Image (spheres, rainbow, N blue to C red):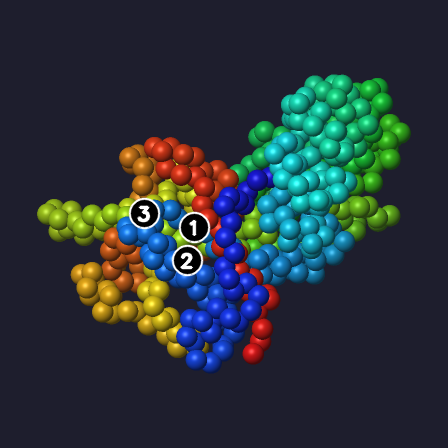
Amino acid sequence: MGLLPASRELVFPGTTSKAPLLLRGVPEYHKPSPEELVDLAIESHIARVNKHSLAGGDESFFVADLGQVTRQHRRWTQSLPGVRPYYDPTLLKLLADLGTGFDCASIEEIRAVLNQGVDPARILFANPCKSPAALVYARQAGVIRTTFDNLDELDNIKAHMPEAQLLLRIYANDDGALICLGEKFGAHLDTVQPLLSRAWELELDVIGVSFHVGTGATNPTSFAKAINHARLVFTQAQRLGFTPTILDIGGGFVDSHFEPTASLLRETIRAEFPAGVTVIAEPGRFYARSAYTLACRVISRRRQLGSAAAAGVPDMLYQNDGVYGNFMNVIMEKEVMGPSVVEGTRGKDISGGKCEKDSEDLSSRGISGAGEQRYSIWGPTCDSIDCVVRETTLEREVAVGDWLKYRNMGAYTSTTATQFNGFSSSHDILYVNSESLPEY
Ligand SMILES: Cc1ncc(COP(=O)(O)O)c(C=O)c1O
């Protein structure tokens, strides 16, 4: 599942030492918070861009805090010990080291994981509708664990990967999920018997059951219901002669509902599988979303005049990234963006004091610097759908050349970006690690 930003990568030269903080002239070392570290990376990148380009650079960029991924992994293992996450094949090195498996949707994703030297046995080809070419590639690469949910896929698998270890993907649905995957995938309970019988006839091996309640799920009971259904399917499979051992509880986990969801999951798994079962999961958003911050540059501004000004219509900011780029979620998930201003790259005080605005710099650009301002924010294309946020309040007046930052941009952003109107869909990523900073 390619949901993470992945393209050209830069490494912020302060991922593991206090050197960059001293270089910035901070008199006494103060361990920055994760947000401060990300802000420092943003500011140093902007300073670099400004130095090397007369016009100040034209591309938005990401800062990824690997420490945040580590913290999410810690949360996962504390709440769901024994449930091995199969992760999206980006952030590969870190997650490979953390011991996760990898849930891949395509040849390219499998290739990316294998290129990191990951054992093919750690990969689940979790796309229930694969092309013959994808099956041939996966088999040659040694990836033989995959999902199915229809009769034709069984024939496909028999023809191209007869030794496959199969998980039957069953229908599951959280009505409140941001995107319901059940519309596209998942065998309904009344179709399970013919599917299992056909797999048996074809002498294929069904080793378990998988489901996905939908991405951005908020109702823990949807997981519980899906596990109840999986239990029924295990029994049906056992009656036919299969020996299912794996329960794949999919993705859908969100930060805000994680612990209650995990608690109900543990309880339901214990109740439905008292003899034990190997449980795996495919969390995407949970690990990625909060680790990434996106910085965008304001490239143009329309100050309202005439009747619009009299009616209080907010001024309009145009930035170098929009819904055809990293903000597709504004349309797909109706996400309401809440950016904030990146303050001056000169001398931000991270030793506990308030962020100093460079008032000289602001006033030379005609910005009073004082007071909140309402804006609508638009992407760079010529399409009026390309609106990032209809109305938001920023800390101060913003002008062309200023940068805005958007937190929580790690899931379903650059991987869904297009090149509409000729705008680039590849972006720099700076990696920092707030978990490996010294305390002193
Ligand atoms: C098969 C599969 N696994 C995992 C995921 C990741 O889901 P999430 O980001 O909601 O955890 C997806 C998302 O579409 C998916 O289709």
Q: Quadrant of the N terminus?
A: top right
Left or right of residue 328, residue 99 in this image? right
Which circle's residue, 2 or 1, is located before the other in the chain?
2
- The residue under label 3 is which amino acid type? Gln
Question: Are the residues flagged by discs 2 and 1 in contact, CB closer than 8 Å?
Answer: yes
Please tell me which residue is depicted at 83% across the width and 40% down the height of the picture. 245
Total count of labels: 3
- The residue under label 2 is which amino acid type? His
Residue 77 appearing in the image: yes
User: In the depicted view, which residue is nearer to us: 208 or 29?
Assistant: 29
Reading the image, the residue beneath label 3 is 319
Q: Residues within 10 Å of mark 1 (few under 14, many from 20)?
A: many
Disc sitting over residue 45 in the figure: 2
Left or right of residue 69, residue 281 in this image? right
Left or right of residue 14, residue 107 in this image? right
Q: Nearer the viewer, mark 2 or mark 1?
A: 2
Label 3 CB-ligand 1 distance < 8 A: no
Q: Position of residue 293 (x, y in %)?
A: 46, 54
Reading the image, the residue beneath label 1 is 61
Identity of the residue furthest to the right in this view: 241
Q: Quadrant of the C terminus?
A: bottom right
Kindly state the secondary structure of the residue where label 3 is placed: strand
- The residue under label 1 is which amino acid type? Phe
Q: Position of residue 21 (x, y in %)?
A: 47, 71
Quote the CA–CA distance across marks 2 and 3.
17 Å
Identity of the residue furthest to the left in this view: 306
Q: Position of residue 36 (x, y in %)?
A: 46, 67
Quadrant in which ligand 1 is drawn: top right
